[in-house]
Amino acid sequence: MTNPEHEPVKIEGVYKKFGNVEALRGLSLTIRRGEIFGVLGPNGAGKSTLIRSIVGLIKPDQGRVVVLGEAMPNKPILSRLGYMTQASALYDDLTVRQNVAFFAGLMGCKEDAKIQTALELVELAHRADSPIRILSGGMRQRVSLASVMAHQPEIILLDEPTVGVDPQLRAQFWAHFRRLTEQGITIIVSSHVMDEAERCDRLGFIRGGQLLAEGSADALRQQAGKSNLEDAFLWFAQQKGAVQ
Amino acid sequence: MNLSRIIILARRVAQQLVADKRTLALIIVVPVILLTVAGVLIRVEPSGLTIAVVNQDEGLALGGQSVNLGDRLTENLQNFDLFDTKLMTTDDAKRQIENGDLDAVITLPPDFSAEVAQSRQLNLNVQFEGSNPTVAERLRNAFEQVGDQALAGLATLQAGNESDGNPSTAAIETNLQATYLNGGPEFDTLDYTASALIGVFVFLFVFILTSISFLRERLAGTLERLQATPIQPLEIIIGYMLGFLIFGLLQGVVTLLYTVFVLNIHYHGNLLNVFVIESLLVVVSVNLGIFLSTFARNEFQVLQFIPLVVVTQVFLGGVLWPIEEMPGWLQPIAYMMPLTHANTALRAIMMTGESLGGVWVQIVALVAIGVAVIGLSARTAGRVRM
C-alpha cells in the first residue's frame, strides 16, 4: 500500500489534543515524491501541529504518521529530513558557516563542499564568516534554509518560511524550492498567504484540525466554482460546516 | 549514543563562548577581582588600636627563682604589632576607655602569677571597648596568643623543676603545643576561604552559562531544531558538559595560580586532584542549570535561580561558616549540596595535600548527586515547552 518511493509522507487519521484544544481531528493526507505541497489555512488551523507531527516532535494521540516508510517519531529517519521552524532558529554568536555546519553535522554531514553548496544556493557564500547577530531578518531566513538543506535531505518541511520576508526575497525562496524539487526533493510548506499557494504543485486546505480539500490550485478553484483561491477556501470551509 | 554528535554539540558550545569574548574575559576577571577583594578584607589588619595594661602583679618565687608572669605578659603585648600597649593605673585606664581612647584594658591583679600557678589556668581580665565587634574579636585572638606565649615561657623556666611535683604546668605546655600543631599561626582564614571559593566560582560560572544558554535554546527555537535531528537528550547533556568543562578547568587553573602566586595562600595539593573535583562540580552544575532552566520562561526568571542555587550553597556549604556549627536540622540539608562536598575535598587537597583516596567520601557524594541531576536534566532536556 504505502510506497515510500512515491509517497514519502503518509498521514493516517491523526488526532492530537493539547489540554482541551483539539489541534488535529482525524486528518489524513498523502504527499507525493518531488512535489511542493502547500498546507494552507488560517492561524490556529493546525498547520504547525501537522508539520511538527511529521517531524516526530509530536506523537499523535490516534492515527499514525509514516515518513519514508517508518512510523514517526523515529530519530534515525530525521537525518533524511530538513525542518525549518517559523522563526529562524539560529545561534546568534556563531557565524553563518558555523550554524550551517552545526546542523548539517548533527544530520551526519561533515563535508565542507556540501555546506559551501548550500551557502551558494542561498547566495550567502560571501557572508559565510559573519556572525548571525549582524545579519538582516531576510538573511537569517536564508541561513536557516541553508542549514536545513546542506545535508541533502529527501524531504524539507518549512513552517511559514516567508513570514516577514520581503517580496523580492520571497520570489528567490520559491525559486530555491523549485530547484530543490528538480533534484527529487519533496517540499512541504505551510502558509496562510493564499497568493503563495499558486506556486505549490498541490495544496491541502486545513481548518480546525481537519483537511477541507486537497488538489492543485486549479482543481480546487474549479471544484469550488470560484475564480480565486481565497473564495475557494471559504467555499470549502462552508461546505464542511454544512456537512457537520 | 553517538560520539560524533556529542563532539559536534560540545564544539558548538565552545565556539559560542569563544565568539562571546566579553563573557570569556569575565569568566577569568570576575573571580580574580573577587578573590583579591576577599584576600584584602580577610587579611586586613585593623590599625590605630591602643590597649592599656594595668599591671599590679607581685610575682611569685618558684624554686629559688622569681617569676613575674604579669611582666612577661606585658612585654609580649608590647612586642605585638597589632596594637600599641600602654602601661597605666586603674583610674587612668578607666577614664581613657570611657573617652574612647582605648580599645581594651587588661588588668593583672597582684596575685596574677600566684593564681596561674595554683589554678593552672591563665585567666585574663579584659575589658573591651566593644563598639566594633571585629576589633574586639581580633584583640581577643591576639590576647589568647600572647597568653599562650607567656605561659610557654613560664613552662620553659620550670623545665628543670620537675622534682617540684608540678606536672600540671607541663600539661598546660603540652596543650599549647597541640594548638600550634593544628595549623596555628601559619594558616590564615584566606587559606580556608580561597580553596573553597575556587570551587564556588567554577560552580557559579558553569551554572549561569548553562541555565542561560539552555533557556536561549528553548526561546530561540534551536532546541526544537535539535529535536528534529537524530541527537538524543543524553547526547545534548554530555555535549554541554564537555563544552563547559574546558572553560571551567581553564578558569580553575587561572584562579588557582592567582591565589597561590599572587595571594600567597598555602597550597600543597596536586593540580590533577583539584581538576577531578572541579570536573565533578561542572557535571553537577551543567545538569542543574539545564534542569532549572526548564522552569524559567525568560532570563529574569532564570537569574533568580542564581541566589537560590548558588548563594544558599555558599551559606550552607561551609564556605564561610563551618557545617558543624550549624543547627542540627540544617546539617542534612548542607550535606545534600554538592558545594559542601566539593569544598571539603578542595580544602583537604589544597591545604593538607590530601590524595583522591583521602577524599573518597566527598567524591562518592558528588558522583551520587551528579547521577541524580543527570537523571533530572535528561528528562527535561527533551522538552521544548513546559
Image (tube, coloured by chain):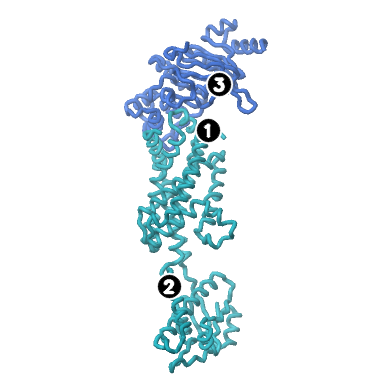
Chain colours: A blue, B cyan
Residue B150 visible in this rendered orientation of the protein: no
Name the chain letter of the residue that bears numbered label 3.
Answer: A
Q: Residue at x 47, y 45 (%)?
A: B370
How far from the left and from the top, in percent, is residue A135? Answer: 44, 32
For the residues marked 1 and 3, what is the alpha-carbon distance in whole angstroms?
18 Å
Indicate the amino acid at tag 3: Lys
Element type where label 3 sits in the image: helix
Judged by depth in the image, the label closer to the viewer, 1 or 2, is 2
Task: Residue A99: name its quadrant.
Answer: top left
Task: Residue B294: name its quadrant.
Answer: top right
Q: Residue at x 52, y 74 (%)?
A: B140
- For the C terminus of chain B, give its image quadrant: top right
Indicate the amino acid at tag 2: Tyr
Q: Residues within 10 Å of mark 3 (few under 14, many from 20)?
A: many
| Position above or below: A43 against B88 | above
Name the chain letter of the residue that bears numbered label 1.
Answer: B
Residue A47, numbered label: 3
Number of numbered markers: 3
Indicate the amino acid at tag 1: Val
Judged by depth in the image, the label closer to the viewer, 2 or 3, is 2
Q: Are marks 1 and 2 in contact (CB under 8 Å)?
A: no
How far from the left and from the top, in percent, is residue A86? Answer: 51, 26
Q: Are marks 2 and 3 in contact (CB under 8 Å)?
A: no
Element type where label 1 sits in the image: loop
| Position above or below: B150 against A128 | below
Q: Earlier in the sequence, mark 1 or mark 2?
A: 2
| Position above or below: B169 against B4 | below
Task: Residue B260: name its quadrant.
Answer: bottom left
Element type where label 2 sits in the image: helix
- For the N terminus of chain B, give its image quadrant: top left
Residue assigned mark 1: B384
